[in-house]
């Protein structure tokens, strides 16, 4: 199977169950007619805008790309007085640095398909400047929509720009529709304004197909609608940095990062349903603090965090590389062997509530066994995020209905994402091509698109082609 062009529309924040429900109610007629294949996929952790784009653009997890969150702190860089890239928040002006911050050697689909075009996406490694159609205008659309809550304007602009760009016959076109995510944050994933964003997307598909048919290119074009994460409604916010400071831990956090010195910890929240916590080591900042040392030095910190109803899961890494994950339900360890086998050991009771997972699984086997649980693919996702040198000493996943950022979030988030819970991790994959009936990861779409285009697939990526 091969096509001459691929269009990928990333409907930021789209939930699988909502798209499925709207299709069943015949409210997405253009998608139903032209993109009849709907599959349920699982995104990457953290399930948040930006890092969760990377699987589609690189075939690699955020941990592999060394972008472990929308905010991060680099302990090794911070330990060096004159080093750059010590910390980041991709919310705001630093969003332009994300492509530069991806680990060296990671190739994007833009670089692998030279006639690639980009609309409203800020991760631009490999794209030719003239093919980045919104490199200047994107920030102004986002700024206007942020001030006015008029995100339909950005979605409609994206739809119009796709049709215009088809005149240039791109081999690959990547487009972001932000409306679903933004209206979900402002109100709810199920709010009428959010649902309207799905309907705008459906209208856009009709116009895209009409243009492709006029060009006699419809039969040779593959279209994917995907999402980077779902969302769940948020009722209560925990100010994680304030909580830590209440325990006597002087904490560095965004946006208060200018002229901050002498702190003992850093809190970097993403989504706002997950967070990285970083702690100063005994002899300075360099190096991850092993789980054993953290338990010894931080005076019951893990227990105190788990006493908070807002915090669902906490993970850290032992000195030997083993991941430890704890919740109020139980505790487990996760590691991989040299042969790539995932070892999962429960201590007393399972922290995810999984029913009797085997102690040894293949990577894909762990996906299949956890796919329909409350925490799909969580063991593999925790392993991948700790690959990043910028990952926290502790990784926190929030309880459904809560998030981890109270102040400095304007406007207030009424819905959140970022966690390991299924409402954040499950995503739709909609296409005009038949796909196998098996669990799909977002990293699998990248090699699938390259195979469709007849392009070589890079070695040592995390995904596998679906065709």
Image (tube, rainbow, N blue to C red):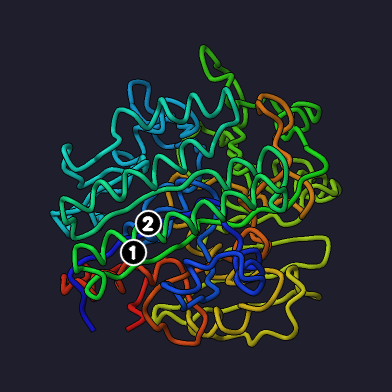
Q: Label 1's element?
A: helix
Disc 1 residue crowd, few under 14, some 14–19, many 20+, Cα 10 Å: many
Judged from this view, the residue extending furthest toward the left is 114
Q: Residues within 10 Å of mark 2 (few under 14, many from 20)?
A: some
Q: Secondary structure at mark 2?
A: helix
Q: CA distance from mark 2 to mark 1?
A: 6 Å
Q: Measured along the vertical axis of the image, is residue 335 above or below residue 49? A: below
| Residue drawn 63% across the image and 42% down it | 183
Q: Let me know if residue 292 appears in the view.
A: no
148 or 439, nearer to the observer: 148
- What is the x, y in percent for residue 170? 18, 56
Residue at 41% over, 37% down = 76
Q: Which image quadrant is residue 114 in?
A: bottom left
Q: Position of residue 86 (x, y in %)?
A: 42, 30
Q: Nearer the viewer, residue 14 or 339?
A: 14
Q: Nearer the viewer, residue 429 or 248?
A: 429
Q: What percent of the width, then of the height, locates residue 327? A: 77, 60
Q: Is residue 397 left or right of residue 81?
A: right
Q: Is residue 204 above or below residue 223?
A: above
Q: Residue at x 32, y 84 (%)?
A: 467
- Indicate the quadrant containing the N terminus: top left, top right, bottom left or bottom right: bottom left
- How many numbered marks have been drawn onto this rendered protein structure? 2
5 up-or-down from 356: above or below: above
Relative side of 383 to 15, left or right: left
Q: Is residue 291 visible?
A: yes
Q: Position of residue 19 (x, y in %)?
A: 60, 65
Question: Which quarter of the picture shows residue 119?
Answer: top left
Q: Do the residues bearing badges 2 and 1 touch, measured as CB atoms within 8 Å?
A: yes
Report which residue position mark 2 lands on.
Answer: 207
For disc 1, the marked residue is 209
């Amino acid at each position: 199977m091969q096509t001459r062009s691929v269009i990928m529309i990333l409907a930021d924040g789209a939930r699988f169950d909502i798209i499925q429900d709207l299709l069943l109610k015949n409210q997405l007629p253009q998608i139903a007619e032209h993109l009849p294949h709907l599959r349920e996929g699982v995104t990457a952790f953290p399930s948040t805008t930006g890092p969760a784009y990377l699987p589609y653009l690189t075939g690699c997890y955020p941990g592999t790309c060394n972008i472990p969150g929308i905010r991060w702190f680099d302990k090794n860089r911070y330990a060096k007085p004159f080093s750059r890239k010590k910390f980041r928040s991709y919310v705001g002006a630093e969003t332009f640095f994300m492509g530069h911050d991806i680990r060296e050697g990671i190739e994007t689909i833009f670089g692998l398909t030279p006639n690639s075009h980009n609309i409203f996406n800020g991760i631009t490694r490999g794209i030719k400047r003239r093919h980045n159609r919104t490199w200047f205008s994107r920030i102004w659309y986002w700024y206007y929509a942020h001030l006015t809550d008029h995100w339909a304007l950005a979605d409609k602009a994206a739809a119009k720009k796709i049709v215009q760009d088809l005149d240039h016959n791109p081999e690959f076109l990547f487009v972001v529709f932000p409306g679903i995510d933004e209206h979900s944050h402002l109100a709810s994933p199920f709010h009428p304004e959010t649902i309207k964003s799905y309907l705008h997307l459906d209208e856009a598909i009709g116009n895209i197909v009409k243009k492709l048919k006029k060009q006699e290119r419809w039969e040779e074009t593959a279209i994917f609608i995907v999402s980077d994460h779902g969302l769940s409604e948020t009722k209560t916010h925990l100010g994680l940095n304030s909580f830590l400071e209440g325990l006597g831990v002087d904490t560095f956090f965004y946006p208060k990062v200018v002229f901050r010195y002498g702190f003992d910890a850093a809190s970097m929240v993403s989504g706002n349903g997950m967070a990285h916590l970083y702690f100063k080591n005994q002899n300075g900042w360099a190096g991850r603090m092993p789980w054993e040392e953290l338990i010894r030095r931080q005076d019951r910190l893990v227990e105190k965090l788990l006493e908070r109803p807002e915090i669902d899961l906490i993970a850290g890494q032992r000195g030997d590389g083993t991941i430890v994950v704890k919740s109020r339900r139980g505790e487990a360890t996760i590691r991989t062997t040299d042969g790539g086998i995932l070892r999962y050991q429960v201590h007393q009771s399972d922290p995810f509530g999984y029913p009797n997972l085997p102690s040894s699984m293949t990577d894909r086997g762990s996906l299949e066994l956890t796919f329909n649980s409350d925490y799909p693919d969580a063991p593999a996702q925790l392993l991948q995020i700790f690959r990043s040198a910028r990952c926290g000493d502790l990784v926190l996943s929030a309880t459904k209905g809560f998030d981890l950022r109270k102040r400095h979030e304007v406007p207030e988030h009424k819905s959140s994402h970022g966690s390991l819970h299924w409402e954040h991790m499950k995503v739709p994959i909609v296409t005009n091509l038949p796909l196998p009936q098996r669990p799909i990861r977002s990293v699998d779409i990248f090699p699938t698109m390259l195979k469709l285009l007849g392009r070589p697939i890079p070695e040592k990526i995390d995904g596998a082609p679906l065709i």
